[in-house]
Image (cartoon, rainbow, N blue to C red):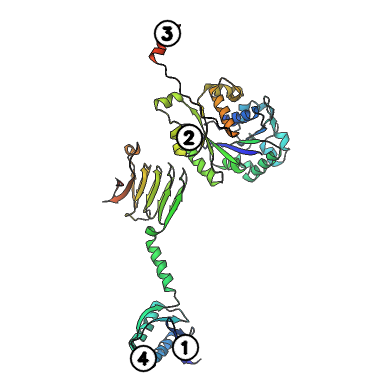
Amino acid sequence: MSEVIVITSGKGGVGKTTTSANLGCGLAILGKKVALVDADIGLRNLDVVMGLENRIVYDLVDVVEGNCRLKQALIKDKRFDGLFLLPAAQTRDKDAVSPEQMQKLCESLKEEGFDFIIIDCPAGIEQGFKNAIAGADRAIVVTTPEVSAVRDADRIIGLLEANGLNDPTLILNRLRVDLVQRGDMMNIEDVTEILAIDILGVVPDDESIVIATNKGEPAVSSQESKAGQAYRNIVQRLLGEEVPIMSFEEKQETFIDKLKNLFRH
Amino acid sequence: MNQENQVIFKGTKDGITVVFDPEAPFASLCEQLEKKVEDASKFFDGVKTSIAFKGRVFSDEEEQKLLDIVCSHTTMQITFVKTENDEVGRISALLSKQMQPFNLTKFHKGSLRNGQRIDFDGSVVIIGDVNPGAEIKATGNIIILGQLKGMAHAGCSGMSEAFVSAVYMAPVQLRIADIITRFPEENKKGPKPPEYAFVKDGQIFVMELA
C-alpha cells in the first residue's frame, strides 16, 4: 500500500524541505521504500539538502514531457537503500507541469512499488501548490510558532480541505523552548487552538539542523540531535505507532544545584 | 364563435368557476359576464362562495373589473378569488423576498479559515470559529457559535438593525450596515462571556449577552 504525502506550509522558510528530507530519510532508515519528489520547479532545494545535487541528469519536467523514463530520473540516495529523489527542474517554472500530469506521475510512482511518496511543495498558493497537492493522498502542514506562519497555515488547511485533502496533520517546527517558557512565543496549545487539526509532531529549534542541512546530511540520522529525535518520533507516528510528543522542558537549575555545581568543580 | 360561450359558469364543490374564452376581447367578456350574472342574479342571491376565474390570465385591474361586475349585480358574498395568476405563489414569493434578511439563514458547520468567505443574502450562523483572514458578509444577522477573529459584516446591504453575536468576540474588524469599527485590542484578550454587537445612534456597541 503506497501513500502520497504532500508537505506544505503556505509560507516560505518554515522548513518544508528540511521536513521532507528528514521524513524521507527516517522512513528509509526503517526499511521503507521512499520517493522524495521536489515539486518546487525553478527553485529546487531538496537535492541540495540531500547532498545529491551533483547526480542530477534528468528531472521531473523531463519525466512529464517524456524526455526520459521515470526510472532514469529517480536518483538513488547515497546513504540509505530504498530512498530515491525525483528532483525538480531548475531552468523552468511552475507552469511547465499541470495538476493532471502530477497526478499521473504519482500514479506511476505508486506502480514502481514505493511505500511512501513524499512531495515537497513550494511556498505560495499558486500553480506550484496546485501541482504539488494534485496527486496527494494526505497532507502534512508545516508551520513555525509565528503569527504569520500560523495564518498562512490556516489558509493552506482551508485550501487543502477545499481540494478534498481532509484532515491534514500538523508539524510545529522550530519551537524555541526558552522563549515559550518566558511566554514570548506561541506554545503548542496556542497553535493547535487556532488551526484545530491533529498535531503530528513538534520539532525544536536546533542548530544541528542548520549544520546538517549545509552538509547535505539530514539530521534524522544523528542520534545526538534533538530535532533528529523529534523527526524520528514523527516517522514512527507516520507508521501508525503511538509516540508521545516529547517534552522539551529544560530543567530549571535551582540555586542549590548551582551551588553544588560550584563545589563540584 | 358564439358569444354566449365566451363566458361559462360552472358550479363545483369548491364554489363557482367562471371559464373565459382565451381569445375573445376583454370588453366582450365583460359584456357577457354582466349579462349572465344579471340573468342569474336570483340564483346567486346571498350565496357565500369562492369564485375561480379560469381560461385566461387577467391583470389586476381586469380582475377587479370582473369582480365589480359580479358584485354590482348580485348580493353574492365572495370569500376567495382564485385566478390563473397563481396568486398564492406570487404573494408567498413576495413575502419571502421581503422577509429574506430575517428569514433565510445559512448554517455553516465547521470553522472558516483564513481566505475563506461567506457572502449571503440573509442571516448566517457559523457553528465553529471564524479565523483571522476569513470574512462573513450577510444582509441579515450573523451568529457565531465559536470565536470570531476574522471580519464580520452584518446588514451589508444597509440594514442597520442587524447584529453580530459570537461566543468569543475578537474580530479584526466589525461592520454593521455602513458602519465600520476596529475592535479594541484590550477586548481581545483573556476569557470573557459571549457578546453581541449592534448599532445605536450611528455607532456600533458591543454588549455582553446576559
Q: Can residue B120 be seen in this view?
A: no
Name the amino acid type tagged 3: Leu
Give how far apart the Cα atoms at labels 2 and 3 are.
43 Å
Give how far apart the Cα atoms at labels 1 and 2 are.
78 Å
Q: Which of marks 4 and 1 is nearer the N terminus?
A: 1
Query: What residue is at 47 percent from the left and 44 percent from the top?
Result: B115
Give how far apart the Cα atoms at labels 4 and 2 are.
85 Å
**In the rendered image, the vertical position of residue B152 relative to residue A197, given as above or below:** below
Image coords of residue A5 (percent x, y): 60, 38
Q: How crowded is mark 1: few (under 14 residues within 10 Å), some or many (20 or more)?
A: many
> Could you tell me if the residues under marks 4 and 3 are in contact, i.e. CB atoms within 8 Å?
no
> Could you tell me if the residues under marks 4 and 1 are in contact, i.e. CB atoms within 8 Å?
no
Query: What residue is at 48 percent from the left and 90 percent from the top?
Result: B5
Q: Looking at the rendered structure, which numbered label has been put on residue B41?
A: 4
**B143 and A38: which one is in front?**
B143
The chain identifier of the residue carrying mark 3 reads A
Establish whether labels 4 and 1 are both on one chain: yes
Query: What residue is at 72 percent from the left and 41 percent from the top?
Result: A66
Residue carrying label 3: A262
The chain identifier of the residue carrying mark 4 reads B
Name the amino acid type tagged 1: Gln
Give how far apart the Cα atoms at labels 4 and 1 are.
19 Å
Q: Residues within 10 Å of mark 4 (few under 14, many from 20)?
A: some
Establish whether labels 1 and 2 are both on one chain: no
> Could you tell me if the residues under marks 4 and 2 are in contact, i.e. CB atoms within 8 Å?
no
Query: What residue is at 58 percent from the left and 22 percent from the top?
Result: A212
Label 3: element kind: helix
